[in-house]
Structure formats: C-alpha cells, structure tokens
Amino acid sequence: MSSLSILILAPLLLASFLATLVGIWRLTWAYIITIIGIALSLAAASAGLFRVLQEGTLRHYLGGWPPPFGIEYVLDHLSAFMAIIIVFIGFVIVIYPPGAGLYHVPRKGVPMYGLVLLLISGLIGVVVTGDLFNLFVFLEIYSLASYALITLGGNRAVVASFRYLVLGTIAGGFYLLGIGFIYFSTGTLNMADAAQLLPALYSSPTVVAAAALIVIGMGIKLALFPLHVWLPDAHSYAPPVIAAILAAVQIEVAGYVIVRMMLTVFRPEYFIEILPITSAIGWVAAAGIIFGSLMAIAQKDFKRMLAYSTVAQVAYVGLGIGLANPLGLIGGLLHILNHAFMKSCLFLIAGGIRFQTGLHEVSQFAGLGRKMPLMMTAFTVAALSMVGIPPTCGFFSKWYLILGSVEAGNWVFVAVILTSSLLTAVYFFRILEKLFAAPPNDDEAVTKATEPSPKIVVPILVLAIGILVLGLINALIVTRVLWPVVALLPTG
Amino acid sequence: METYYSLKPLLAVLVSLLAVVLIVIPNQRPNVRESWTIMAAVAKFTIVLSMLPSVLQGQYPEITLFAISPGISLALKVDSLGIIFGLSASLLWVLASFFSIGYVRGVPEHKQTRYFASFAICLSATMGIAFAANLLTLVVFYEILTIATYPLVIHKETGAAIAAGRRYLVYLLTGGVALLLALALTYQISDSVDFRAGGILPAGIGKSSLILLFILFLTSFGVKSAIMPMHSWLPAAMAAPTPVSALLHAVAVVKAGVFGFARIIGFIIGPGLLQKSGMGDFLAALTAITIIVASLVALRQDNLKMRLAYSTVSHLSYIVLGLALFSPSAWIGGLLHIVNHAMTKITLFFCAGAIYVRTHCQNVSEMNGIGRQMPITMSAFTLASLGLAGIPPINGFISKWYLVQGTLDVGQTIYAATFLISGLLNAGYLMSIVCRAFFRGSDKFVKYGEVSPSMLIPLVLTAMFSLLLGLFPDQFPFLFQLAARVASNVLGGGGP
C-alpha cells in the first residue's frame, strides 16, 4: 500500500483549480501555482518510480474502499514509466514562455494554466488508475482539455479542434461501449478483478466485441493509420507548446491503454493468438510508418511536417505492440520516451523560430543556422535522433524494434523500419541543408534574426541534452524499468 | 593475448571531442582556435603511440564503459589490428592539421570553426572505430563518422557541393541501415557481437542466413570503402576542401570501411565460413574488377582530385582483395597497405591542395611545367606516385610484394595479374602528371614559388615517411609484426 500514485495526481488537480481561479486575477500567481503543482507532482513521480523499482507494484484504494467496490490506483513499472515522462514534458512546456509557445499570451480570462494542468492530470489519471471506468473519466478530462487548448491556435485551429472533438468523442464512445460489455459479462470494472474473471469468458462474443471496441477506440486516439485523419490539422494548427505535449505524450497515452489492456486486463495470448489484434495493429502501424513519412516529405510547413512525422513515429509504438515479443514491445515503449523528448524539442524549436522571425515554412529557413547556433544545434541533435543515428536515443528504439522483428522473423517490418529511417533522413536533412548550407534568405526576418532569449533556449537545450543522455543510459532504463513490463510476453 | 584495464583508449577517443568544445568557443582569435586542433592532434597521437609497446608485447589495453544495450557494452580494446589503423590516422591528423591551417587561410575558406570542429569529431569517431571492442560500439562510431563528415562534404556550399552532400548521404545512410540490420542479425544468430579472431558465428549457420548477412555487410562497408558499384559518392565528395579529401577521403573515412571489412572477415564471420560459402571468392572478384575499372577511369580524369579519387577507389580494393584471399601474406600485404596507401595518397592530396592554393589549377592538362614553379611539391608528388605504382624502394612496393605473394600462395594467378596490371595503370595515370610537370614547358609557371611552410612541411614529411617505410622496413618492424600477428590469429596459423 502506498499513496504515491495519488500524490502524483493530487497536486496537479488542485493546482489546476487554483490556477484557474487565481488566473482571473493575477496571471503571474497562476504561473507560480502551476510551477509548484507540477514540481510537486514531478517529485512524487520520481519517488514513485524509485519505490516501484525497489518494492514492485504500489496500490492505493481511494477512500479506503477496497476493490471491486472502490476505485484502485496502481503504480507499477509501466505506469511509473509513463507518469514520469508525462510530468517531465509537462514541466518543460510550462516553463517555456507562453509568448513563444502559444504565439501570444492569451487575455486574462483564458484559463491556459488551468487547462494545461487539467490535460496533464487527465493523462496521469489514465496511467495510474486501476479502474476501467475511472480511466474513461480521465480520458475525457484530458481530451476536453486538449480540445480547448488547440483552439488557442486561432480560427483554423478551432475547426481542427472540432474535427478532433468529433473523432475523439467517437473514440471515447468506442472505449465506453467496450468497458460496458466487460461490465455486462463480468460485473466488475476493476482491472485486476476483470483479469481474474475474463479468461473463463474469452470465447463469449461480448468479450470479443469489448476487446475490439476498446482497441479501435484507442487506435483512433493513437492516430493509427488510417484513423489518423484528425491529427495533422490539430497538431499543425495548435500552438507550439500544445502541439508539443499532444505529440509527445498525449497520443501515446492511448498506446499505453492498449498495452495495459493486453498485459493486465486481458492476457497477452488473447490479443496475440485468440484474437489477431496485435498482428492487425502491427500491419496497420507498418502502413502508417511509411504513409506518415512520405506525407512528411511532401509538407512545406515545418509544424505540419512534424505532425505527419508524428503519425509515422507513434506507429513505431504500434509496431512494438504488433510484434508482441519482449524486444519488440521494449522498442515500442522506449520509443514513447524517446519520441516525447525528440518531438517536444522540435515543436518548441518551431515555436522559437516563429517567435523570433515569424517564419514557419521550411523553404524560408535558409541561413538561420548561423543566426541561432544554440537552438539549431539542438535541432540537429533532435533531427539526428529522429533519423536514428547513434548515440542519440532514437537509434536505440529502432535497434530494439529491429531485434524484435528479426526475432519474430517478420522481414516486412524490418524493411519498414529501415526504409522509414531513410525517409526520415530525407525530410530532416532537407532542413539541415537549408539551415546550414543553402544560400541565406535575404528576407529581413532572416538577416535580422538572433538567438532567442534563454527562457526559450534553455528548455530546448534541456530536451536536446536529454536525447543524448537517454541514448547513453537506455540499457539501464530497459533492464530496470521496461524488462519487468514485458516479462509476461511469450518469447521467440 | 591478455588484456588490461586502461583509460588510454577512452582518452584517445575523447581528446578530440574536448577539442571540439574548445574550438567552438565564440569570438576567439583564429590562432587560438587552431592551437586547440594542433594540441588535440598531438595529444591523440601521443596517447596512441604510448599504447604501442604494450600492444606489441601482446598486452591489450581495454576499457568497458557501460551497457549500451542489455548484454552489450560500449567497450574499447586496442588490439594489433586496431592500433595499425589508429596509429596511422592519428599521426596523419597531426600533419593534416598543420596543412589544413595553411590551406584554409591560403584559399581562404569560410566557416573555419565549423570546419575544424567537424574535423575533430571525425577523428574521434575514427579512433572509436579503430578501438571498438564489439560490433555495436563500432556501429555507433561508424554512424557518427558518417554524419560528421557531411558538413565537410558540403563545406563550400556551392550547388555542386550540396549535390555531392546529398549523394553522400544517400549512399552512406543506406549503408548505415544495412549495417544496423546486419548487426541485429549477428546478435540474433550468435548471441554476441564481440570481436574474436577467427569469427563468432556458429559453424552450423544456415547458408542462406550467411549469404544474407554477408550481403548486408558488403553493402554497408562496401559503400564506405567505395567498392564498385557503390563508389560514386567518393568522386563526388571531392567537392570538399582538399585537406578533407586528403585525410578523410583517403585515410580516415574510407579506411574505416576497409577496417570494417577486416573486422567482419576476420573477427565476426570468420575466414572459414566465408571460404566455404564461396562469398570470399565473390568479394575477391568484385574487388579485382574495381581495381582495374577504377584505374582505367582514373586515366581519363583531367581533374587532379578526381583522378586521385578513382585511384583511391582502386587502392581501397587492393586492401579488401588482400583480406578476401585468406592467405597470411595477402593479409599482411593488405594491412600494410592501409598504412602505405595512407602515406602516399595523403601526400598526393596535399600536393593537389598546395597546387590549388598557389596557382588555382585543378586540371592536369593545365599543369605543364608546374615542376619549375613548385619543385619541392612536385618532387614529393613524384615520390608518392612511384610509391603508389609499387616501384621499389618506396613503401607501396612492400605491401604489393606481400599481396602478390599472397595471391600466389593460394594459387590465384589471376589476382596477381590484377595487381601487376593495376601497377602499370597507376604509373600511367600518375607518372603522366609528373612528366607534364617536369618535362613539358609552359610560360605560365616560370617564377619559383612554393606554398607556405605549414603546408609544405607536412607534404614533405609524408613523402619522406613513404620513402623511409620503403627503404628501411626493418626500422619499422612493429608494423610488420602487428600485421603478421593479426594474420596468424585470424587465419589460425598459430604464432605470437
């Protein structure tokens, strides 16, 4: 028993309330409350990860009601891993100045800090809850916060947000229907309890439908090709910091839900053998990787290119699930962490460039490399990591995915991973070439450009250094944190 | 063979990375900035040299840093093969640094900070490749080398340079993904990626997996060692400044590919399996074709650097052919040629750079009588040309002697003929330049004028080294001893 799981969540929810109220009066105070809330949550998440590594799974019964009557919060290796990524990325985007991160500081009444905190608490709630319905509640909390935050990007963003709202609600509906079916068959909504009761009912059509509905719903949330249609608009029109947190952690949480269903609620064999769910996800993801990479090459707008790149990169997570062997899933899960750092770094850079120069199209970037050396060095690191150059972290997720594919004997997946590395190289080296080698743009925006202020550069550099450090210590993360997660999976 | 813990291999890798940090400090005077390069180069060479005595005694310095993937560590180990490559690359970096300084100021080149910083990263990566104790470590440094060379290829930022950069990336990154897959397959098959003389693949490996694995390794290292038809990035990369062509595209980068072949043939797949599967013969045939075709193409090049580039293509295949013959003499010849070709080819590129800085001539047809203006440069050029053609007493003769002997040992006279014909072609495409320089007159080059000492001294030194290595091979017995030990370990002939 430990209340650490709830301690990650509580400061965020509390701060979100306070920041909203105080924000109406003084924005600075709201900012301070936000920072304190996230810092406390980050401390709890770190302590949680540490305790889980020492003692194993930590459980907390909300209000002292034991399951199946009460709601249970569970912090195991997987949820502690996700929680610390979510809170850390949340922390970085909050310290990034809103002037650059949201294009402009919204007027006082807009509860931007409250919404961001609500988004983060929703994400945390999803990963720490041990209750299927409670998970739905948090799913909707973070989704609603996301819809609202995307609209800060202006008129086009409002339309994109509405489109996302429609599809996101459908996805939530699928999930709700799925857990409804589980409740009908088993009479419980507690994950551990359901896991005990479900195996006897595996052949029941209701349970088959439940698994399928949940996976399809989460497939939409994870933007798995061809259910990705909402993503490019939503992520390219959303303000940079919002796009950063959406791409870095928000959609990956849907991947977490699928993994949680596969490993905890159902048994892996059910998803692998009885229903061909994992292989379906794998093939869809493989198609998404190629599609997303090709579409990214075709984009002119930097953020839109990043958005399509996200379609390809989250599909790596799907591919890891699809491989359903330990090494493959390690690759997929490690990619959640790696992609969180890379993509948030890149979106923050997009925000920095736009703030300093007003530019957003790749073709206009010529000559910026020398004007903003620090930020562009960070860009280079993130880009190389996206391509998968060692020792950056992006190399290692690919390495485990390839090991997993080779072990599964799936040569198509191997070819997809390798091809996508080359396609990624095309769209990132195109930018590097523009930044550092192309004849400089004579535009005043470029000739007068300077390095942004440290407030903008420091968060970006932190993420870039993180990309290198994560690459070097990946073996530690894999053996200590991820190996226990995937130990249940069949090998070979 | 024993190993002992030592920090030196790590220092040899890191010293130039430290220099990168110092080089990019903004607003320092060029002289200060360049002094970091020189200091790092000298320090690196000293560190590598200080490991030579113990390696000669069979004591290998080793350092295991940390696990970089479960079960595989980032580890460095200086063995006989590694130190041959490490020593030649670090020695030549010292000379190339002096030459670079003269060159970039003589031309003058722009963005010199980026230039020197990339150069230093390349040398770190090269040391990492030379001293990697397992394949994953080698791949990490190999990819760093690929990326760090890119800014140097596009350095001039002209349309041609950018196009060359793109071609470079397409070839090298494709090779890189092939290498990644080969690495994963090796790990899957043998559950280890540590280098061990004689190979680590299980003897019972299926033929189709072996062939797949070999093709993948051939694609990856073949690109960097410019085996035809994977060579065309190298002539294109001549768009880079000449010191880059000299050190990276004649020594560090391309030899990293050749070195990769030595590691794969000798320490991963193993000669036995390669011979049995017929893949060795395939590699030998491919390299023999490359040797002849590249020499013929070199004859037709008017641009001096392009001619040298095709000559490099052909000489890299000399080394790989030697490795693919599986005879001790051929291995010795191939490994010695790593050093000998490095010395002579870097001399030739230095000369090309000196000529360019002084006269802005790039084409052979414009060089009539240039020997009159630059007699020292062109004498060095002549010496190195003779060396490459394999004429005694210059060093190229020694490696070629062993290579030819190796072909005869295994009864492959056709490859002996390949080496001899290629020697003639070498003489054809290089000595014709010497003839133009000294025996054809032109009123263009009447005035005596050499380049600055910082360029002239390095090229004279490398030419002298070439001569000394050929005249007194007994004075450098360690090279032969190292090569012979590698050959006997790999090919299982026993011995020290």
Image: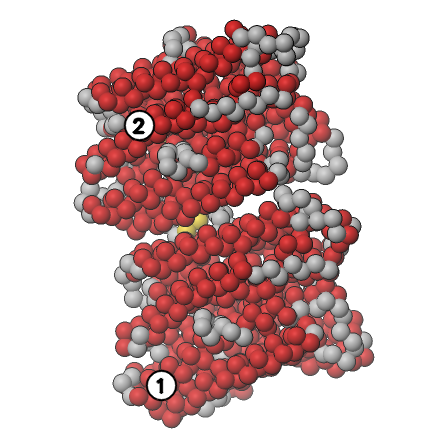
Q: Residues within 10 Å of mark 2 (few under 14, many from 20)?
A: many
Chain to which the residue tagged by mark 1 belongs: A
Element type where label 1 sits in the image: helix
Image point (31%, 74%), residue name? A276
Chain to which the residue tagged by mark 2 belongs: B
Q: Is residue A195 above or below residue A463?
A: below
Question: On the rendered structure, is B2 left or right of A347?
Answer: left
Q: Position of residue B351 (x, y in %)?
A: 55, 18
Element type where label 2 sits in the image: helix
Q: Residues within 10 Å of mark 1 (few under 14, many from 20)?
A: some
Question: On the rendered structure, is A113 left or right of A339?
Answer: right
| Residue B115, quarter of the rendered image | top right
Question: On the rendered structure, is B277 left or right of A255?
Answer: left
Amino acid on which the number 2 mark rests in the picture: Ala
Q: Is residue B203 above or below residue A452?
A: above
Q: Is residue A65 above or below residue B484?
A: below
In terms of depth relative to the viewer, which is nearer, A439 or A146? A439
Q: Is residue A384 above or below residue A86?
A: above
* Residue linked to disc 1: A209
Amino acid on which the number 1 mark rests in the picture: Ala
Quadrant of the image for the C terminus of chain A? bottom left
Q: Position of residue B378 (x, y in %)?
A: 54, 11
Q: How is the image coloured?
A: secondary structure
Image point (38%, 46%), residue name? B178
* Residue linked to disc 2: B288
Are labels 1 and 2 assigned to the same chain? Answer: no
Q: Position of residue A451 (x, y in %)?
A: 73, 51
Residue A109 can be seen in this image: yes
| Residue A260, quarter of the rendered image | bottom left
Q: Position of residue A7 (x, y in %)?
A: 58, 75
